[in-house]
Image (cartoon, helix red, strand yellow):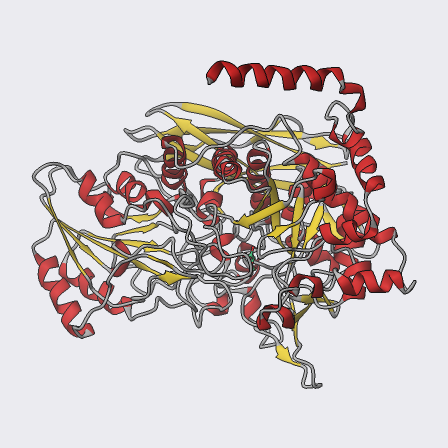
Amino acid sequence: MKTISLIAAGAIACSFAANAADIPVYLDDSKPLEQRVEDALGRMTTEEKIAIIHAQSKFGSPGVKRLGIPEVWTDDGPHGVRPEVLWDEWEQAGWTNDSCVAFPALTCLAATWNPEMSYLYGKSLGEEARYRNKQVLLGPGVNIYRTPLNGRNFEYMGEDPYLASIMVVPYVNGLQDQGVAACVKHYALNNQEINRHTTNVTIDDRTLYEIYLPAFKAAVDGGAWTIMGAYNLMGDQHLCHNDRMLNKILKDEWGFDGVVISDWGGTHDTEQAITNGLDLEFGSWTNGLSNGASNAYDNYYMAQPYLRLIKEGKVGTKELDDKARRVLRLIMRTSMDRNRPWGSMLTPEHYAAARQIGDEGIVLLKNQNSVLPIASSAKKILVVGENAVKMMTVGGGSSSLKVQRELSPLDGIRAAAPAGAQVEWVRGYVGDIGGEYNGVTTGQDLSESRSASELIAEAVEKAKDADYVIFIGGLNKASHQDCEDSDRFGLELPYDQDAVINALAKANKNLVVVNVSGNAVAMPWVKEVPAIVQAWFLGSEAGNSIADVLYGKVNPSGKLPMTFPASLKDVGAHNFGEIAYPGVARNDGSNILDETYSEGIYVGYRWADKKKTAPIFPFGHGLSYTTFDYGKITADRKDMTADDTITFTIPVTNTGSVAGQEIVQLYITDPKCTVDRPVKELKGFAKVSLAPGETKDVKISVDKSALSYFDADTHAWVAEPGEFRAHAAASAGDIRSTAKFTLK
Ligand code: BGC
């Protein structure tokens, strides 16, 4: 049998080689991409072009069967590859080979401040997606963290446009190096979940360009093959077909040659979809779908309704060709690239990557009296809190996953505890006992019949004679927590966790609070609790990463990608009434709400600096088990011109007794300018590893882009000559030294 098949394979290869000259251009990958795209386009009928620009199932669109051009399969995104759902529905298809490795949430990735982690993330996720034969992975998300109430902040990369811009590109490249397109979402101004389909955002151009667009532009400049429009509106047009944002900015200004994919159900109008920049329509909620008609996809805005307009001569085919061309380009870049790798899933390397990213992203917020790491002599460890055991990969909306395995924090701690140590868990509080999303169930029974006071009394009693008490709480993936389609009600921890923490702080001086969330939370007990750890949603290896840090196997090196404000009043967006958040209903018979980003560019630490608020923990904050000394920052020149770069040197020394990594931040101040400017802005950073006693010179270069503001009148970036300051800082709240320089 084997010999026969070898001969057969050889025969096919020979005949293929003999007829190489007859291969149509679009199938010949020795030909340039654009030539192949044009060739394919030229062979297609209008109907075939219409077919490839809208879905034929929940996550797939057809290729061109007649020409051997494959289908496009998309999938969420952004933390792992979502399980297969039914053709027309969100419910599970029931496959048994579609579980995945869950990687840490993107807030955690941003908290590593390490572009290498970002590439590792994209590569590992891309391998899983490729193996599952997905052409588009619906991620990463880079909407700016405007308010800590946004239910989807955990899927994004924090509050700072520079940090998000640096971190998004390697993720995109890592993914696309596997032949899987990134889909950068949700472009743009989708900064809240409440009323996400009906909020019309008004924003000034300077704020748009300085705060909300840079990370998207970086991803586009970095080569992203697709981008997803947002649900909400800007300038009274939905962002999935928005002339200004998609045609003028994304395609004309930035030269994006990829595919604009609608968010699922984000398309609302055929004519706008045709002319305003949408290329590929998914998830539309046609009557056909809800009524289960077999031709539901034909009723999509860019399906029969579009074809009819063409046939009636009401619209031409110029836009159609452009959309089809973009989709063909996507297919050639992915499934028609014969050289792309094969991918792999559930490999030890993927688990190792998830753990490493988690290890690097966990942030040690406070560590009074060096309570952490847990002493190896500790015999009695009491773990308290629902999040110590609750699976966090199920729920939260479209990023929900079906994992092969997920190690809970409690199990991670148990595995890491030295022989002879006793690790006990008590509930402490009841949060969300649900464990199901779209038919994926955790299988956990978290039901509880005892009262809140009984649970607290039990925890306090056991805490009294423990060597360490580790409270693991925070938010979860239920509605109004860290979850799509709803926002949080407030900054406070839910389920009265503050009462549990306060009681534990009185019972044991070795209390560690581990906050599992994708958002800042209020910490009224911050002074009473000696050690606080921000642990994010860490995916499959959650337990191992948390234990690595708690036991000191890993020296924490993450820093916050967002400010932890003391109260909502300290957040720009929450200072201008409902018009700034969550929006005001128009009352004109439409369902639209108006919202103005009244705080302008003053988002996150920019607001905290301007108003001189005292956050509980500032942007960029994070401690280590060692300490770092910063020497004086120096510049390689005193004056620079608009064509130069200037390089700053910051000597950093590890002054403690263990090796560690420090994230050195460079902020720029323009003290005198004709426009109002933030007190300082992040324009560079470097993560550096230092052995005990070691000193390294950290070098960070900037050019005039780091000195510029966006001038809306001239629609240009402007760096005004004059004096600037560069600050070497350990966080936005901890400037270590400053250098002055002049732009001539
Ligand atoms: C979300 C997207 C997601 C899509 C497909 C939408 O509800 O907003 O982020 O990719 O669903 O699941």
Tell me the quadrant of the picture where the C terminus can be found.
top right
**Residue 279 visible in the shown view:** no
Q: In this orientation, which residue lies closer to the viewer: 438 or 168?
A: 438
Instruction: Report the residue at 58% width, 77% height from top.
Output: 578
> On the picture, is 564 further left or further right than 388?
right
| 49 versus 148 height, above or below | above
| 460 versus 357 height, above or below | below
> On the picture, is 252 further left or further right than 430?
right
Image location (x, y in percent) of residue 188: 65, 57
How many marks are shown on the rendered structure? 0
> On the picture, is 360 further left or further right than 467?
right
Image location (x, y in percent) of residue 283: 61, 61
Instruction: Report the residue at 88% width, 61% height from top.
Output: 311
Instruction: Report the residue at 71% width, 16% height from top.
Output: 17
Judged from this view, the residue extending furthest toward the right is 313
Q: In this orientation, which residue lies closer to the viewer: 457 or 178?
A: 178
Ligand 1: give its quadrant.
bottom right
Image location (x, y in percent) of residue 498: 28, 67
Q: Quadrant of residue 388?
A: bottom left
Image location (x, y in percent) of residue 626: 32, 35
| 496 versus 529 height, above or below | below
**Residue 569 visible in the shown view:** yes
> On the picture, is 383 further left or further right than 331?
left
Q: Quadrant of residue 136?
A: top right
Instruction: Report the residue at 28% width, 66% height from top.
Output: 497
Q: In this orientation, which residue lies closer to the viewer: 138 or 402?
A: 402
Q: Quadrant of residue 165?
A: top right
